[in-house]
Image (tube, grey):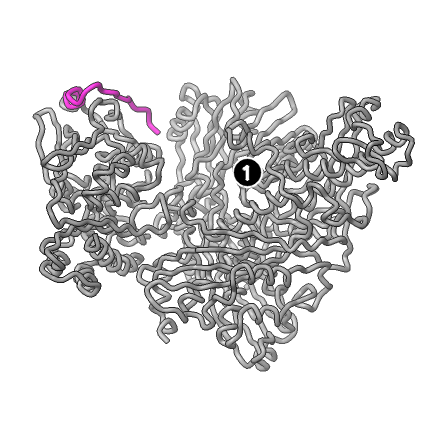
Amino acid sequence: MKTPPPIDDAFAEYAELARTQGTQTATPGSTAPAAPAPQPKPDEFKYIGKATPRVDGRMVVTGAARYTHDLAFGDMLIGKILRSPHACADLVSIDLSGALALPGVKAALKLKEGRIRWAGEPVAAVAAVSESRAEEALALIKVEYKPLPHVTAPDKAMEAGAPLVQDQGNVIKSNDYARGDVEKGFKEADVVLERTYKTSWEVHQPTETHGSVARWDGDDLTVWDSTQAVQSIRDGLARALSIPAGRVKVLKHYMGGGFGSKLNLGDYTVTAAKLAKETGRPVKITLTRRENSICVGYRPTAWMTVKAGARKDGTLTALSVKSYNCGGVGRGDRVSEPYSDMYACPNVKIEEFSVFVNACASRATRAPGHTQATLGLEGMMEELAAALGMDPLALRMKNFAAKDKGDTGIPYSTKGLEQCYKLGSEKIGWDRRNKKPGGGSGKVRTGLGMASQIWPGAGAPGTLADVKLYPDGSVEVECGTQDIGTGTRTHIAVVAAETLGLEPKDIIVHIGNSDLPWAPISGGSMTTPSVAPAVRDAALKAAEHLKNLASKKLGLPPAEIVLENRKAASKADPTKAIELKELARGLPRPLPFHGERSNYPSTFAFQTFGVQFAEVEVDTETGKIKVKKVVAAHDIGRVINRQTAESQVLGGVVQGMSAALFEEKIMDPRTGTMVNPNYHDYKVATAMDIPEIVPLFADVIDERLNNLGAKGLGEPGRIPASACIANAVYNALGVHVREIPMTPARVLAALKRKEARP
Amino acid sequence: MKAFQFGSPKSLEQVTAYLAGADGDVRLMGGGTDLLGEIKEGTIQPDVVVDLKAVPGLAFIRRDADGLAIGACTAVADLAADPDVARDYRGLHEAAAVVASPQLRNMGTVGGNLCQRPRCWYFRDAATVCNKKGGSQCFAEQGRNKYHAVFGGGLCWSVYPSDLAPALIALESKVVVASPQGERTIPLAEFYAPPIVNVRKENILSRQDVVKEIRVPAPKKGDRGAYVKFMERGAWDFAVVSAAVKLTLAGNSISDVRIVCGGVAPVPWRLKAAEDALRGRTVSESAAAQAAARAAGDARPLAENGYKVDIFKAVVARAVLAAAKG
């Protein structure tokens, strides 16, 4: 086994970002405080923590919101990409002449040379006056391939003599973690269990497929991109095209989902920019559903063999994990953190391996690694509880970790998981579970299961936002973040309105533009805990300025003035007040106030926590699972906007339920391609499958973290959803399916295992 | 997608006259819910698409002494919403109501549902040339086949997904086919042909034939029906297994029964062995389960679809019991 070489894959970059967000520092020389100031209590807020409908909701549902797919310019060309039909081949030659000879074709590019490692790899591209002309042109490109043997199944790739996917071998060790002595720990245990849990390739399937429009104005490039990261796409494009970053502007106004697949600079984006340069006309490339299913990543699998030891009272004595993670030609995810961090356990050993196959590289998918690990870790906790004859919730409480690294590291600044356990277990009626898994009878069995969640979500210090006061009284917030569908505009409006005594609808929000003040990628649950504190910081400065202006007009010290109901008013006598609009008239020019997200202390660990409880019905004759209810209780610090926060949890649970029951990218071993690259055969849950979902929040405000005490929520709702459903199925049947999606085939096979017939 | 001509005929006579002289790949379109998918995914590359919905008078549900007449261009949603159908032909009503999704039921037609192409991800893939597309092998047989046929495979292991076909065959319906030579009426049970007859297509229509209408016999006293569809997800899914049952009860005893399944074979699949096992028996859970088990004995599952046999047994037994319950 060799050490991992640098492989250009999506995960490495993302994982690093997620990993280092806790060590990011504020801008050098900035005035951002090293630590946040004391904070108002929740009931002192009018909008923060309450429910505000999306400020742009009407635009989205009426179709007025413009997505990248909607863009069209008069002289715009359509670009299309020719992709390799072979899963492994050497590219011998590409002849573009046939395509270039076709009337209406304005440019053609070669995109590849050398070894092709997956079916769907870009080979060439054209730009033509219409989509159909571009498609015709692709058919006229002559490519000579020398096909080579391929392998698309991880178990086959691990066999001796399998076709080599990467030069260094098909299996490499990708992670090694150890503390204490697991062998000693297993000897101390009264019960030791070893189980293997598996996850499948889950495709992001955003409703809006990936796409970009590129337009040059002289040396300046503007790219409209369906992306989760306008800032890093700008930087990536500048590098890819060898032009100064200052000449690139990336715009993204509205977006139909990304879930991690749109964090990376797309080859289609670079191609659109190159074709636009060559033709002198704007070029649009949008991927088809088939391309989107095959070519832009998926959640890598994890095949995790988990061994746990516990004393009779439930105390964990040892935990060892061996995980084979498959992300195509990429390294896949690391799944170690929930295993190493979630529970107090002195002896832990984790070994991870990357398995390479001939498929496109996986990409970060809503809580990379943690989602897979939670199926294994929480599945084991549930099976261990049964073996110990314990309440699974009591087993988790028994091993509660107040400190990082399973109680061996630095203390958590706040950990509201106990509150979540209490809220969630009461709401689901945890006492209704089968005390012994499989205790029910009849053709249709019911069960309850739970799974806990840990995930960073501390946000990025150094995030910038400006609040601008105009002499006409209008207020604008500018931030170079983006809304990936989570409601970023709304939370910005809520924070600015709260701080300035205005209403959310009064705030003009400009985001989705890389020229605006820096903000991080919208991934890793970073957007709200990065952006909201920066907006708050800027708005507090603007509020101070307004109070100073009012102080002169009202003849009161600034400290005696409050901003509320669109007025600056005396705290003591609200009738002594001046309209903010009138105050603004005194401004000589638009006045910007710069805000920045602060640092946080390195002596504490910052994580989000949560738990979900599921209730299911399983038809033992057909293997069909019906999820009846999910209660999701999360600790995400201070909730900024309760309405969009709840939406975020609903979406996470639905996605996790869908992955638990339906979703799987299925590869054909002979052709090396995906057989279900469409919305019909790749099954995403429909409205008919969605259970009652109850989102709850612990509302534990983390005053050390930032000036609002807010953590992120993009990922937490997704993390335990598949696992708690799998555990509920276990509670219903008395046999754990241990592999998602839990299709009828897998449920029926599990029911035929010996352990299902006690 | 290759450019094609789009025809909007004014009458059925225009359609048949056109078909008599047409060459090239001509496709008839009802709602287009299957055809457009085939075109967009590159499964087919027609030269001409003829829009049958443009023809007046092909969308109707009429009831008379002979039974029910359903125009080929009747929307599946209209069939599902028809109160007479719901009262007299419960199995047909249940089948229509679970087709795909509301949008697809609004667009899709009864004729189109009966003439849709089978489901197989290799057949549908533009780059794969299988037996069904003039090639020389079935890719599913040794490939990925969790949704494929457990009955009637061999040359082709695709599955016929229509919900309406099993229900209408169980009701002994007939199809009225128009052609340049005139009209003819064919029992729907004889309309479908297995791969062994012609692997390239699923029915006996020639390229000049147009399905005009469906006739369903009037219900007899004691007739009952049901349609049970097992889908992986709650909507917009083809049947993994479906079963349409029509049975006639004399007291508590089954005097006649027809069981036709969808999703398990390249064509709608009649379960004669199960019917024989049930005829003359009293309705009971065990009788239904035994009949289903007997039918399952003929199954030939592939590597990944053995679970469909388990589901088949449950679905058939449940459909029999649901029909008997009335």
The one nearer the camera, B322 or A128, is B322
Q: Is residue A607 left or right of residue A160?
A: right
Q: Chain of mark 1?
A: A
Percent coordinates x, y for residue A75 in the rendering: 51, 18
Q: Which residue does the image show at 53% across and 49% down from the upper left? A: A652
The one nearer the camera, A61 or B15, is A61
| Up-down relation of residue B184 to residue A681 (above or below) | above
Rendered image quadrant of residue A188 = bottom right
Of the residues shown, which amino acid type is indicated by label 1?
Gly
Q: Quadrant of the C terminus of chain A?
A: bottom left
Q: Is residue A504 left or right of residue B103?
A: right
Rendered image quadrant of residue A47 = top right
The one nearer the camera, A9 or B174, is B174
Q: Is residue A196 something one can see in this rendering?
A: yes
Residue at numbered disc 1: A266
Q: Is residue A43 left or right of residue B193?
A: right
Q: Which residues are magenta?
A: B1-18
